[in-house]
Structure formats: C-alpha cells, structure tokens
Image (cartoon, rainbow, N blue to C red):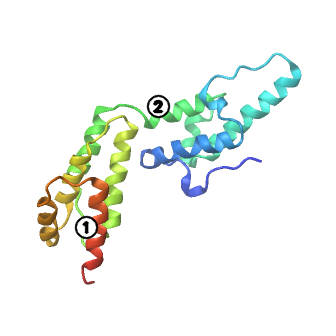
Amino acid sequence: MVNGLKVEDKLDGAANYTSWKFRLPIVLEENDLLNYVKSVVDEPSDDSEKAQWRKNNFMARKILIDSIKDHLVPVISKLDSAKEMFECLQSLYEFNNIGRALALRRQLLHIKMARGESVVSFFMKITELKDQLNAIRDSIEDKDLVMLAMNGLPHSWESFIQGINGRNELTKFDRLRADCIQEECKIPS
C-alpha cells in the first residue's frame, strides 16, 4: 500500500523544503523504496526481476511526483529514475548560493514583530528563516538568533528585554521563545 504526503506537506519551494526532505524518505522507506532514491538501482537482466524493478521504480517516481506541488512537476517530468528526480529537486533548494544566504540573513536582520502578531508567529518566522539557511548549509549561531529576536520585539517589551539582558548568561533561543510566550500571556489584551 502506497501512502503519500498530505497536500499541505507537499514540496512548494524553499520555505518547506527542509520538512519535505525529512518526510519523503519516511514515506519511501514505509513502501520499501528508499534505495531507489539513495542510489542507482540497475535494471536486472532476469525477466521476472525486471517486472518488479519497473514496478518499484514507477512507484518511487509516483511518490516523488505526488509529494510536490504542480508547479514543480515539469522540472522533473522528463527524468527516468527516482534518484534523478530527487537529486534534481535537491539541486533546486539545497544549493550553497551566496546571494540566497545574503537575502535570508538580511530578512533575519530586519525581522520585526508586527502589531497584533503573536509571539508564536514571530518566532516561527525566525525559525523558518533559520531552517532555510540550514538547507543551503549556512548556519546561524544560537546567540545571534537570540539577539535578532530580542531586537525584533516591539518597544512595549523593553522591560522584558532588560530582564533578559540582566541574566548572568545569554539565554538560548528556545528558552527565549518559551519566556516570550509566557510573557505574552501576562499582557492584558
């Protein structure tokens, strides 16, 4: 039985590439087809094995096609193997492009919590940008994320920020997120 990804989990672009790349191998492994994406599986010479190989290659390709949004199908439609399809999608979103890294870092540098935006949403945007940087093999240190997040909080949070700054050690990003969520609960609506 072939199980695929839910519509909302389909690869749409760089924004959800990291989560798609995590989910897809699980679906392929569940269907005993992961090796068709990881390595070249040569067509066997034996006729009985050939039929199974064709079926497996077809199913792996089908899972890949079903795991992406329609606008990406033409990119991989002419490729013959699941491995080629996967590598093609990887090359689209897992490249080390200085311009892309610069754009993502610029977005992080200028990120601000919008009026009426929840803390959860604000931190989710930061995390998505961090994940996109990780996808192109450009990581950002936790302390830098903390500083960017604190810099993006509104002026009404100034006393909270001063309390964070008063700690002996710089807090971790995950701890800052939890503290901000707790602080938001205290603010009257």
Q: Which residue is mark 2?
A: 91
Along the polypeptide, which appears first: circle 1 or circle 2?
2
Q: Is label 2 in a helix, a strand or a loop?
A: helix
Are the residues flagged by discs 1 and 2 in contact, CB closer than 8 Å? Answer: no
In the rendered structure, the answer to whether residue 169 lies left or right of residue 29 reads left
The residue that appears at 73% across and 38% down in the rendered structure is: 59
Identify residue type, mark 2: Ser
Tell which of 161 and 168 is nearer to you: 168
Q: Is residue 130 visible?
A: yes
Q: Which residue is mark 1?
A: 114
Quadrant in which the C terminus is drawn: bottom left
- Relative image position of residue 172 (x, y in whole percent): 26, 53
Gap between marks 1 and 2 measured at Cα: 34 Å
- Relative image position of residue 42 (x, y in whole percent): 71, 19
- Relative image position of residue 71 (x, y in whole percent): 54, 46
The residue that appears at 20% across and 64% down in the rendered structure is: 153
The residue that appears at 78% across and 29% down in the rendered structure is: 54
